Each structure stands twice: as structure tokens, then as C-alpha cells.
Amino acid sequence: MITGFSAILREAFSPVPGKVKRKESGSDGVKTSDKMKKQVSNAGEDRAMLLGFTMMGLSVLMFFLLGIAILKPFMLNVWNEESNCTIIQADIMDDWVDCSFTCGVDCHGQSKYPCLQILVNVSASGHVAALHYNEEAVQINPKCFYVPKCQRDKNDLLDGVLDVKQYFERKNDTPFACFHRHDSKPEDVILIKKYDRSVVFHCLFWPTLMLVGGASIVGMVKLTQHLSLMCMVYCSPAKEEPGNVTPRPDSQQSRTKKDEKTLRWRLNSQSMTRASFS
């Protein structure tokens, strides 16, 4: 009877394997979830940093390309003196200008376009000058107002030039803004500049906006990393307080061993007393 009672006590105080396995599996799940969270956060931070540095690199490349293509011609532009011009005469010259056109991969041809010559009176200097559409028109053909796109059908070219001529004839005796360079070429004026201040503004604004956006993304990621580090530093002592410390498994095993010893001692004492009375 005593041996059966002791066996029951041993079974009662022995650790249950199922419960231990469940606790271990639960702790493993918590560890794996923490690892997954760290991996996801690190991947997101890396992608955000990559996006920020990519935006900054592209903005620098845009500054370089637009600076060469637009800002440099704008800074070197000599057509800076603005004045008022009045139409004097607009005629189509008798001699048409030769041009070449393409109608496909292996299709090339020769044609001619009419040359529209417009004479204006410059109010700033009082001289008569030839009006051109922009700086490129002066370099391509200094006698014509503009250079139309070369086509095979000459009638279409003539209709387009006649429309432009009628437009300026309707503006007779009406002053309009024009640009000239009085020192070097007073006989030529242009109607518009190819690269004005609005174009330069857009060329500087959008790359700057991209640069600021990329720098802000990198700065926000660095700030979140710093805040998370500070939170770990200041929150870890609170977890190690005496009331929050969980008991260790070694101390639990020692307590169970002490309880078993005391029970054995009691059972031995009871058996000895019974044997003495018997």
C-alpha cells in the first residue's frame, strides 16, 4: 500500500511531457514571429533607403544633363535686350530654298520651301531689322522668318507660309515685344527666345524637388532607426524589474526535489511508527 501511494505521488509531481512541449513550441513561435518582424522591418528600411538614394542620384543626373542642354545656352544667350517692334512689310521671296525630307526608312527626297521675309521697325534703335522666329532660325537661314518642315507637297508649304503672313499683316501698326542685340547684329531681331525663364524654372524645380524628396526619405528612415534604438535602450531596464522576472526552470526543479524529499521522509516516519505499534 505504501509503495502504491508513493508511486501515485511520483506521478503527481513528475513533469508532464505534453505541457512542456507546448510551452517550448509556444516560445519557439514567439521567437520566430520576432525574427519575422525584424526581417520585414529591415527589408522595408532597405527598400526605402534604396529608393531615397536612387531619387537623389537621378536628380543629380538631371541637373547635369539639363545644365548642359538648357542652362548653358540660356546663360550664353545674347538676345537679351527687349524692345517693341512694328511690322513694316511681309513678303514671300521669289527664290525658294532647297530642303530635303524623309518619308520612311529608305525614302528620301528633295523639295523647296517658300521664304517669308518680315521687316520690322525697332523702337529702341529706330532701325529697320529682319524679324526671325527664334535664335535657331537666324542661324539656319538669316533671310527667312522661320524654316518650315520640308514636305513633298509644295502647296501645303505655301499655304502654311501664307497663313503666317496674313497673321502678321493683321498686326500692322500694332507694336509687339521682340528681342535684339544692338551691339553685334542690329539688322536681326527675334520674336521669342527658345529657352526663357519659365523653361529654366521647370528645369531647376523638378530635379530639386526629387532631390529633396530622396533626402527626406533617407532622413525619415534614419530617424525611425534612431528612435527604435532609443526605445530599446530605455525600455529594457523596465523589463528586468524584480516583479517582472519570470522564475527559472532550475529553481523550479530544485523546489520539486525538496518537496519529494520531505514527502519521502514523512512516509518513512509513518511506516516506522506503524511498525513499532504492530
Image (tube, grey):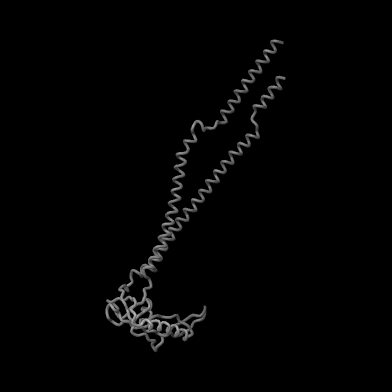
Q: Residue 187 at x, y = what percent?
A: 30, 81
Seen from the viewer's position, the closer of residues 112 and 118 is 118
Would you identify the image quadrant in which residue 16 lies?
A: top right
Q: Quadrant of residue 269?
A: top right
Q: Classify the position of the C terminus by image quarter.
A: top right
Residue 213 x/y as whole percent: 43, 57
Q: Is residue 198 left or right of residue 35?
A: left
212 lies above or below 31: below
- The residue under the point 30% across, 82% down is 128
Q: Residue furthest bottom?
A: 94
Q: Which residue is at a point 33% across and 72% down the rendered structure image?
A: 77
Give the x, y percent position of residue 62: 42, 63
Quadrant location of the N terminus in the rendered image = top right
Please, is residue 230 above or below residue 77 in the view? above
Q: In this picture, is 40 found above or below 170?
A: above
Q: Is residue 64 left or right of residue 252?
A: left
User: From the viewer's perspective, is 263 left or right of 67?
Assistant: right
Which picture quadrant has residue 81?
bottom left
For the image shown, how many numbered marks are present on the structure?
Answer: 0
In the image as oriented, which residue stretches furthest toward the top?
277
Which is nearer the eye, 121 or 112? 121
Image location (x, y in percent) of residue 130: 33, 82
Name the residue nearer the viewer: 215 or 100.
215
